[in-house]
Image: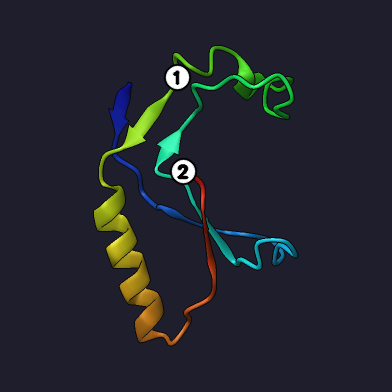
Amino acid sequence: MHRIIAKSILNKTKQRDPWFLDHYTLNPYSGCSFNCLYCYIRGSKYGINMAEKLSMKSNAVELLEKQLAIRARKNNMELLSFLL
């Protein structure tokens, strides 16, 4: 697994998910090692050698603390969905 330095950890969704009721997603990894047969990514250019491209965002905790603090100061505490 590779380590990368991410610029952002929270991803704003275009519209609120009716199932998870979230406004943001959080994914501390880039890529996937599962390679599920039903995965929609497999058919795209990003699905090639996904297990080999698995990367961990090594500064995820610091980024999350920083970005949540900014939203708290702005009184913008919308819901968050975690992908672990």
How many residues crowd mark 1 within 10 Å: few (<14), some (14–19), many (20+)?
Answer: some
Numbered marks: total: 2
How many residues crowd mark 2 within 10 Å: few (<14), some (14–19), many (20+)?
Answer: few
| SS type, badge 1 | loop
Closer mark to the observer between disc 1 and disc 2: 2
What amino acid is labelled 1 in the image?
Lys
Residue at image position (38%, 28%) is 55
Please state, as top left, top right, bottom left or bottom right, where the N terminus lies in the image. top left
Residue at image position (31%, 23%) is 2
Where 63 falls versus 18 (above or below)?
A: above
Whole-percent x, y for residue 58 in the image: 26, 40
What amino acid is labelled 2 in the image?
Leu
Give the quadrant of residue 46: top right
Whole-percent x, y for residue 47 in the image: 62, 20
Colouring style: rainbow
Q: Are marks 1 and 2 in contact (CB under 8 Å)?
A: no
Residue at image position (40%, 52%) is 8
| SS type, badge 2 | loop
Depth check: 66 or 7 in front?
Answer: 66
Q: Is residue 3 left or right of residue 28?
A: left
Can you identify the residue that label 2 sits on?
Answer: 84
Q: CA distance from mark 1 to mark 2?
A: 17 Å
Can you identify the residue that label 1 sits on?
Answer: 53
Where 72 falls versus 27 (above or below)?
A: below
Depth check: 76 or 84 in front?
Answer: 84
